[in-house]
Structures are given as structure tokens and as C-alpha cells.
Image (cartoon, rainbow, N blue to C red):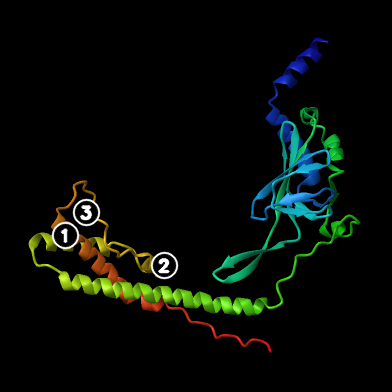
């Protein structure tokens, strides 16, 4: 009797996480990597994350944006044992077609739908590491198979297929590619025009007084240290005039005198503008030929 009491004390001191980890190992041997066919409705946002589905008995509660009827085919990618529930992370076998807008075009992309079934179970099952009882609890929710081909033969499999692209989608893609190239080239042209205007204005007002030239030299040096070799970097350069003529020399906290600050901004903007004029023309992209519309 004394030995039994000692064993009970030892068991009671084992952390719940240790019990859960052993339970997870037993559950993973049965469920991890298995193919399943759902027998309850499920929900997913289809956004790359696992959407929560709280399951109590056969009742499912979820805020996922897409509702799936029972009979969905999925793969179990993770199993977690919590204090009073089992979490099964599922990835649906069949993708969905999601629409999005780019300018005046409606485009589509294939997305994988993922969900997390948070199945509530009696806490005693977790504490007792009773994997067999948990399997029996999960069985009414998921029909389990070792292979994809077996799951596809299930009478419960709903056979859902991804919806098709619109009939004229190839035409839409071709016109979108033309629009995209034209938009890119228009942006490049506008930035080159801006750089030409700014450099002309600065060149016309360069002053010969010493404070201005001192700041101008500092601005030229600062601009030369800016990395602007790539097209994206060139397009992102800011050569707009400052809201107020305040500049700082290097890492110093003190503000430059107004004439020095004016020279600094002119020197900086002039060098950046010239770099844009020199580098942006190579960033133009070819515009695809416009496809012929079917008669």
C-alpha cells in the first residue's frame, strides 16, 4: 500500500507538459502525415495561416472566411495535445482560386487553405495519455487513411475541384502585362522629368559665397554615400525640397546655419538628381505586343 502511495505521488509530480509530449508521440504515430476526409463543416481564410475551428462534439465554430462542406480531403501536418483539447493542423488537398485587383484588372491566384481543428476533449483523457480513447473521439470528425489514393476512394470524399479561371483570362493576363509595363515606364519618365527640373533649378541658383559652398560640398559627399545602383533604389530617391531649411553635418546634433543648410540640400539633391538622370533610362521595361482579340 505504501508503494502505491509513493507511485501516486511520483505520477502527480510529473508535469502536464511531459504527459502531453508522450501523448503527442502516440497521437503523431497515428495521425501525423495521414490523409483525412472531414465529416463536419470546416472554415479557412486561405491566407497561408491555419484558421482556428473550435470543435465541441460535432459543432464547429470558426470565423474563417471560406466555409467547406464535409467531405474535404486534407493532410494532417501537426498534432498538439493541450490540457483539454487536441489540435490538428490540416492542409486541404484541393486549392482555391482567389481574386484580387491590380489597377483596373481582376486577377486570380491559387491559394492553399489551411485550418486548425481545436477539438475539445475531457481533460482526464490527456492526463491518462489515453490515445485510443482520443482516437475514438476524433473518428466521428475525420476519416483517416494512410495514403492519398485511399482517401480519394472514400464514399465521404466530396470530390471538390478548384473553380476554373474565366474563359478570357489569358487575354486579361496579356492586357495586364501591357498595362503594368506602361505604368512602370510612365513612373520612370515622371521621375526623370522631375530630376531634370530639379537639377536645372539648382544649377541656376548655385551661389559662390563661402557658407553656401561649404554646405554644398557636404551635401555632395552625403549623396555619394547613398546606395542607388538598382532601379528600385533610384525610383525611391527623394529629391523634393525640404519643408524647412534645416540640415545637420554628419552625426552632429547642432543644426547648420541657414546658408550652409541651403547649400547642403542643393548639393545633395543635385547629385541624386544627376544619378537619376543617368541611371533611370536603363530601367525602362519592354511593352509586350497587344494581343488580337478573338472575333
Residue 38 at x, y = what percent?
Answer: 82, 50
Q: Residues within 10 Å of mark 1 (few under 14, many from 20)?
A: many
**Residue 246's mark?**
3
Q: Describe the element under mark 3 as helix, strand or loop.
A: loop
Distance, label 3 to label 1, CA atoms, is 11 Å
Give the farthest residue toward the top.
2
Q: Residue at x 65, y 78 (%)?
A: 170
Give the farthest residue toward the bottom.
295
Location of mark 2 (residue): 232
Give the farthest residue toward the right.
155
**Depth check, front residue: 65 or 87:** 65
Q: Tag 3 or tag 2, which sits nearer the N-term? A: 2
**Depth check, front residue: 137 or 295:** 295
Residue 84 at x, y = what percent?
Answer: 75, 32
| Foreground disc of the pair 3, 1 | 3
In screen coordinates, is 203 left or right of 209?
Answer: right
**Residue 215's mark?**
1
| Residue 220 visible to the viewer | no
Quarter of image, res 196 = bottom left
Q: Describe the element under mark 2 as helix, strand or loop.
A: helix
Residue 168 at x, y = what percent?
Answer: 68, 78
**Residue 286's mark?**
none
Q: Residue at x 33, y 76 (%)?
A: 193
Relative vertical location of residue 165 with respect to residue 143 in this rendering, above or below: below
In screen coordinates, is 80 left or right of 287?
Answer: right
Q: Residue at x 24, y 55 (%)?
A: 244
Amino acid at each position: 500500500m505504501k508503494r502505491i502511495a509513493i507511485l501516486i505521488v511520483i505520477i502527480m509530480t510529473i508535469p502536464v507538459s511531459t504527459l502531453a509530449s508522450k501523448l503527442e508521440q502516440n497521437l503523431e504515430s497515428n495521425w501525423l502525415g495521414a490523409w483525412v476526409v472531414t465529416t463536419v463543416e470546416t472554415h479557412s481564410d486561405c491566407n497561408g495561416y491555419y484558421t482556428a475551428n473550435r470543435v465541441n462534439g460535432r459543432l464547429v465554430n470558426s470565423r474563417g472566411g471560406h466555409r467547406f462542406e464535409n467531405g474535404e480531403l486534407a493532410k494532417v501536418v501537426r498534432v498538439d495535445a493541450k490540457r483539454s483539447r487536441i489540435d490538428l493542423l490540416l492542409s486541404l488537398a484541393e486549392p482555391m482560386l482567389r481574386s484580387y485587383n491590380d489597377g483596373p484588372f481582376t486577377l486570380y491566384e491559387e491559394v492553399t487553405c489551411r485550418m486548425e481543428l481545436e477539438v475539445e476533449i475531457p481533460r482526464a483523457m490527456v492526463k491518462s495519455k489515453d490515445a485510443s480513447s482520443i482516437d475514438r473521439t476524433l473518428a466521428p470528425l475525420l476519416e483517416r487513411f494512410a495514403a492519398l489514393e485511399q482517401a480519394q476512394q472514400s464514399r465521404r470524399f466530396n470530390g471538390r475541384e478548384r473553380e476554373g479561371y474565366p474563359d478570357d483570362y489569358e487575354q486579361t493576363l496579356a492586357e495586364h502585362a501591357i498595362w503594368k509595363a506602361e505604368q512602370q515606364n510612365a513612373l520612370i519618365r515622371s521621375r526623370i522629368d522631375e530630376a531634370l527640373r530639379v537639377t536645372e533649378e539648382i544649377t541656376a541658383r548655385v551661389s559662390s559665397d563661402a557658407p553656401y559652398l561649404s554646405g554644398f560640398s557636404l551635401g555632395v559627399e552625403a549623396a555619394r554615400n547613398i546606395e542607388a545602383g538598382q532601379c528600385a533604389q533610384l525610383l525611391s530617391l527623394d529629391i523634393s525640397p525640404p519643408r524647412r531649411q534645416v540640415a545637420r553635418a554628419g552625426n552632429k546634433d547642432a543644426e547648420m546655419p541657414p546658408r550652409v543648410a541651403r547649400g547642403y540640400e542643393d548639393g545633395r539633391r543635385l547629385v541624386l538628381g544627376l544619378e537619376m538622370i543617368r541611371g533611370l533610362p536603363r530601367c525602362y521595361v519592354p511593352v509586350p505586343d497587344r494581343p488580337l482579340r478573338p472575333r
